[in-house]
Image (spheres, rainbow, N blue to C red):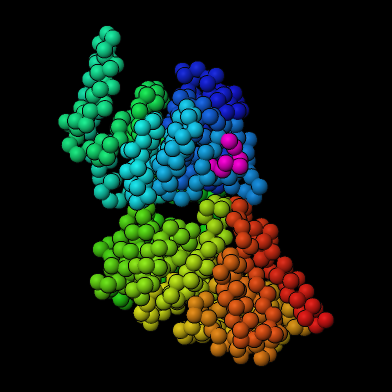
Amino acid sequence: MILEKINAPNDIHKIPIADFPVLAQEIRQFLIESVSRTGGHLASNLGVVELTIALHNVLDFPQDKLIWDVGHQAYTHKILTGRKEGFENLRMGGGLSGFPKREESRCDSFDTGHSSTSISAGVGYVRARELLGEKHHVVSVIGDGALTGGMAYEALNNAAELKSNFIIVLNDNEMSISRNVGGMSGYLSGIRTAKAYTGMKLGVTKTLTKIPRIGTDIVDTVRKTKSSIKQLFIPGMLFEDMGLTYLGPADGHNMRQMMKLFNEAKRVEGAVVVHVITQKGKGYMPAVKNPSRFHGTGPFDIRTGLPLSKAKPSWTDAFSCVMEELGSEEKRLVAVTAAMSAGTGLERFSKKYPGRCFDVGIAEEHAVTCAAGMALGGLIPVAAIYSSFLQRAVDQLLHDVCMQNLHVILAVDRAGLVGSDGETHQGCFDLSFLSMMPNMTIMAPKNGQELFDMMRFAVGNMKGPVAVRYPRGAAFTGLAAYRAPLEYGRSEVIYSGSKVAILAVGSMAETGEKVCQGLKEREIEPVFVNVRFVKPLDTQLFLELSKVCDIFVTLEENTIKGGFGQQVAAWAQKEAPSLRVLIKGIPDRFVRQGRVEDLMKELKLDAQSILSSVLEEIEDKAQ
C-alpha cells in the first residue's frame, strides 16, 4: 500500500505523482473504515482528498502554513502529516482531535472550529511574514458555505492590500452543512457553469506561455491588468473587482490540474483566489446522496450507511415538534437559522411553513439583527442557534435586541457539554454572556415536555428578548410527574425539605435528582428546585429557603464565571450572609473532547462527585 509510506510530514514528496490516484483511493477507504468505527465528519473529508494531496505536493511542512476554515475537513491533512495511527481514538478523550490543533502538530497552523475565520488568520500570517522577512507560503482553504459569513468579506477586503503572495483556496462543493443559500451561492454557480470561459482562458494562457522569451511576461501582464481576459467574459467578476487575482474554476478531483494552478498561484504577488470544485462525500455513495447526514456522523454500517445504534428522541426533536405546533397556532411566528436548518430541527417547520423559515447562511450576527428587524415589523421571530455559535452574535444581541427590548426568542441548542467536537463546540458560556444583558430573560427546561411549555410561554406570554437553552443528545424524560404551570421568574419546587437546597438548572435536573436520592439514603431530606428561570433570579424563593436551609448547592452546565451559581452567591452575600453557597459548574478553562459522561466525571459534575462535595459541606458546617 502506498499509504503505508506516509508516516511523517512531507513523505508525500517521495511518492511518484503517477501513484497519487491510488493514494487518494487508499486514503478514502481508510477514512470510511475509520469513521465508521469512531464517528466523525465524513462527507466533507471525502470531498477534499485530492485537494489536500495537491496542496501537500506543492507545500513543505511545517515551514509553509495551511489554514483550514472550520477545520472539520482536515482529516487527510492529518494523515499526510503522520497522524494516521491516531485515528483509532479520533475525537475521544486524550485522542486525536477532529479539528486542527497546534499542540497536536506543528503542521496545524490555526486552531479552528467555527466558520469564516481562515482568510483573516491567513492575512495575519502574511503580515507577520512580511515584517519578519520570511519566505514561506501561506494558504487558507475556505468553503463556499463559509463565504456566507461576513467575517470572510472583511478579510477579503483587507487581503486585497497585500503586496506579497497569499493563496486563498475556495473549496466549492455547493454545501456547508445544509445546502447553501444566498447571492454568493448563485454567483459561484454561475462561475461553475461558465465552461466556455474556463476552456478559453486555459487555452489562451497555454498559447501565450509558448511564445519564446516573452510569453510568460505577457501572461503575467494580462493577469495583473484590471480588465483581464476573464473580465471580458464574466462582467463584474467579484474577486477581481475586489483587487484579488482569480484562477479557476478547476476540477477539485483532478490533482494534476490543481497542482499546476497552485504552482501558478505561488508566483502571484498579492492575494490570489484559486477556485476548485469538489463533491462532498465523493467515493462513498451514501455520503454523496446524503451529505448532511454524513457531515457529522456516529458509528455506522459501511455497507448500508445506516447508524449502528438507534437514536433516542433528542432535545432538538422536541424543539422541532413544538415549533411545528406553534406555527399553526401563531401565524406571526417565523424561524431564523444560520445554515443549520437540519441541525437545529427547523426542517419540519420549513417544510410546513416554507414562507416563514429563513436560512441566512453562516451569519449568526446577521441572523440576530435580522430577527430584531422582524420583531419591529410585527413578527415573532425564533432564532435557533447553537450555543457556541451564538457567541459570535453577542454585540448584536446586546445592541440590537436587548437595548431595544425586542421580542426575539433565542432557541439555544447544544447548550452545555457536547463531547467529541471539543473546545470549539462546547456550549459552556451562554448563561454568562446572556445574563449580563439588560432586558434578557433566560429559561432552561428540565425535560422535553418542559421545553414545550417554555417555548409556548416565550411565544405567548413574553414581550421582550428571551432565551430558552437546552443541551445536545437524548431528551431527559424523567420528573414527568412534575409539571407546575410556568410563572414568570418563578422556580419549581420538586419536593420540599430542609438543611440543603439543590438548585438545578435545566439539563442538570437529572443529576440533581440523583444527588437528592443519595442524600435521602443518608436520611437527609433536601429541597429540590428546578430553577427554570436563570434570569430573573427567583429571589423570593431563595429568601424563603434561606430560613430553613444552611446550604444552597447550585448545579449548572455552564462556566462558573458569571454563571447562575455566582449570581446566587452574590445575592446570598447581601441578603443571607450566613448561607453557604456551593457552586457546581464548569471551571475557568476550555474543555477538551471526550464522551460527555467522562467529561462530567473529570469536571466533578457527575452525581457521585457532587454528592461527596455536598456531604463534606454538611459535615464542615456541622463542625
**Image position of 542 (left or right of 382):** right
Q: Quadrant of the C terminus?
A: bottom right
Name the residue at the right extreme: 623
| Residue for point 56% across, 79% down | 531
Return the x and y of residue 436 as percentages of the image width and height.
Answer: 48, 71
Return the x and y of residue 563 as percentages of the image width and height.
Answer: 56, 70
Name the residue at the top extreme: 212
**Image position of 284 (left or right of 299):** left
Quadrant in which residue 366 is drawn: bottom left
Exactly how many numbered labels are in the figure? 0
Return the x and y of residue 412 as percentages of the image width and height.
Answer: 45, 65
State which region is magenta: 100-106
Q: Is residue 621 magenta?
A: no
Q: Is residue 126 above or below residue 360?
A: above
Q: Is residue 279 visible?
A: no
| Residue for point 39% across, 26% down | 266
Label the magenta part by its dominant secondary structure: loop
